[in-house]
Image: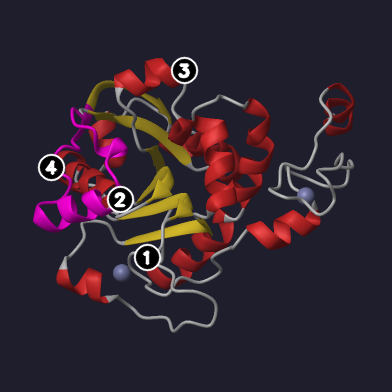
Amino acid sequence: MSHLLDVIFPRYCLGQSCVNKQRLLGKNESGLLCPDCRERHLTWISRPSCLRCGQWYGEGSMTFDQCRNCIDQPHAYTAIRSSLIAEEQTMELMKAWKYANQVGIWQEVKLWIKAWQAHIDELTQLHDLQNPIIIPVPTTKKSYMKRGFNQAQWLAHELAKQTGYDYSDCLISNNKGKQARLLRSQRIINKTKKRATNQRFDIKKNPINKLLSKKSQGNLKQLQKLQNRDILLIDDICTTGATAHNCAKVLKREYKVNRLFVLTLLRQTW
Ligand SMILES: [Zn+2]
Ligand SMILES: [Zn+2]
């Protein structure tokens, strides 16, 4: 099947200043980068420096239970993990997927989703993560209309497909501010002042639940389904962790969920 797709939609390496001159990718090469560009542009996070917020300080850095930031500001979530460092090339591919709706990039993104499995295994070992429910970070109505899709929802669906975990679409965003458009430095200032005051999340009135595992099927109410369950919150990028904190707060308050773990594709470092 993928071979057939390669005939109809040939894939070329999208790496910046590719040494192979952005050559046609063969059927044994997955994603949208040649092996050289993959090696040069992608920095995978195998183990974060802070086991709590998932911040990474580079290859060979020490691992702590909690970094200074986590000690100073307790989080409502238990841990964040990300596949890759947000660098020029990864951000470029992400932007092309999110804003220009270049659907072909999904082939590359799917590889990044696969890297979550190692983090799920690590969280299972560290925290005894139990049969979690996957929930995507919601987008505002406005940006949904603009882009035509919620990227976090795509990611969450794909993970549910890969793992067989339950999926629930129970959060909505009441984000009236322009958090996304603020500079990162400004967002950090916002966070220190008062955590992202313009970013609000709420519970959807009629959530679409695809509670996939047979165990969860039946006529239980949404509340009972989520109560005391562990949550895997899914997003494309983690900048300050404020989104994770705010989602965790509302899910704990409204649904009495157990613990909230976060998986993102990219991680901003500083
Ligand atoms: Zn290349
Ligand atoms: Zn931390």
What is the C-alpha distance between the residues marked 2 and 3?
A: 25 Å
Visual colour scheme: secondary structure
What is the C-alpha distance between the residues marked 1 and 4?
A: 22 Å
The residue labelled by disc 2 is: 184
**Mark 3: amino acid:** Gly
What is the C-alpha distance between the residues marked 1 and 3?
A: 32 Å
Q: Please identify the quarter of the rendering in which residue 80 is found.
A: bottom left
Tell me where residue 87 appears, x and y as whole percent.
52, 55
Tell me where residue 147 appears, x and y as whole percent.
45, 21
Residue 249 as seen in the image, left or right of residue 220:
left
Asked whether residue 66 appears in the rendered view, the answer is: yes
* Magenta span contains residue 184: yes
Q: Where 10 falls versus 43 (above or below)?
A: above
**Mark 4: amino acid:** Thr
- Viewer-nearest of labels 2 and 3? 2
The residue labelled by disc 1 is: 270
Residue found at the far top of this picture: 145
Element class at badge 2:
helix
Ranked by sequence position, the earlier of labels 1 and 3 is 3
Question: Magenta stretch?
Answer: 175-203
Residue found at the far left of this picture: 193
Ranked by sequence position, the earlier of labels 1 and 4 is 4
Ranked by sequence position, the earlier of labels 2 and 3 is 3
The residue labelled by disc 3 is: 148
What is the C-alpha distance between the residues marked 4 and 3?
A: 26 Å
The residue labelled by disc 4 is: 197
